[in-house]
Image (cartoon, rainbow, N blue to C red):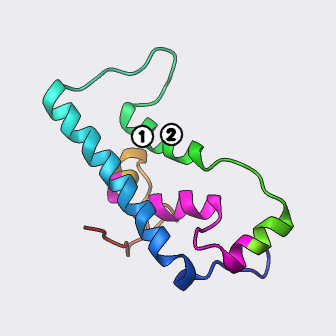
């Protein structure tokens, strides 16, 4: 939205929670794989299970809000707008960049990342 920016101080704790949550989900999956072995791809889906972890997380935040609602959210809500929650959190995880082969320095693989835990 032209002219409006998310207030990083207002959304900081929720942004960190999004990053931490994604990291824990991936680490939990890695533990499961270590205990049970690597799984094959799901029939009819051309994505690895590692990719599907991130796809599922992104789908949770798919939606549409009116421009007025978006303006209100940016001004008052401690949660970033959905598209920022998806791209912002995932771009901070090196494992995301490796999973999707994001070029170093790209929007989804910035050189400086926030490390949680």
In the rendered image, the residue lying farthest to the bottom is: 9
In contact (CB < 8 Å): disc 1 and disc 2: yes
* Residue named by callout 1: 53
Is residue 115 inside the magenta stretch?
no
Which structural element holds mark 2? Answer: helix
Relative vertical location of residue 34 with respect to residue 19 in this rendering, above or below: above
Q: Quadrant of residue 28?
A: top left
Question: Where are the magenta residues, as a range?
Answer: 73-95
- Within-10-Å neighbours for mark 2: few <14, some 14–19, many 20+: few
Quadrant in the picture for the C terminus: bottom left
Residue at image point 38% right, 72% down = 111
Using the image as rendered, state which of residue 45 and residue 59 is in the foreground: 59
Residue 91 visible to an observer of this rendering:
no
Which structural element holds mark 1? Answer: helix
Q: Residue 1 location in percent, x, y?
A: 78, 71
Q: Quadrant of residue 82?
A: bottom right
Residue at image point 48% right, 77% down = 12
Q: Quadrant of residue 80?
A: bottom right
Q: Residue 55 location in percent, x, y?
A: 51, 41
Q: Which mark is residue 56?
A: 2
């Amino acid at each position: 939205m032209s002219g409006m920016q998310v207030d990083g101080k207002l959304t900081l704790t929720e942004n960190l929670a999004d990053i931490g949550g994604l990291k824990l989900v991936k680490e939990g999956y890695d533990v499961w794989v270590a205990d049970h072995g690597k799984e094959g791809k799901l029939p009819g889906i051309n994505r690895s299970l590692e990719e599907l972890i991130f796809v599922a997380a992104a789908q949770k935040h798919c939606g549409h809000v009116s421009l007025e609602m978006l303006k209100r959210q940016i001004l008052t809500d401690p949660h970033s707008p959905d598209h920022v929650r998806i791209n912002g959190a995932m771009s901070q995880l090196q494992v995301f960049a490796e999973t999707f082969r994001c070029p170093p320095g790209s929007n989804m693989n910035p050189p400086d990342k926030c490390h949680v835990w």
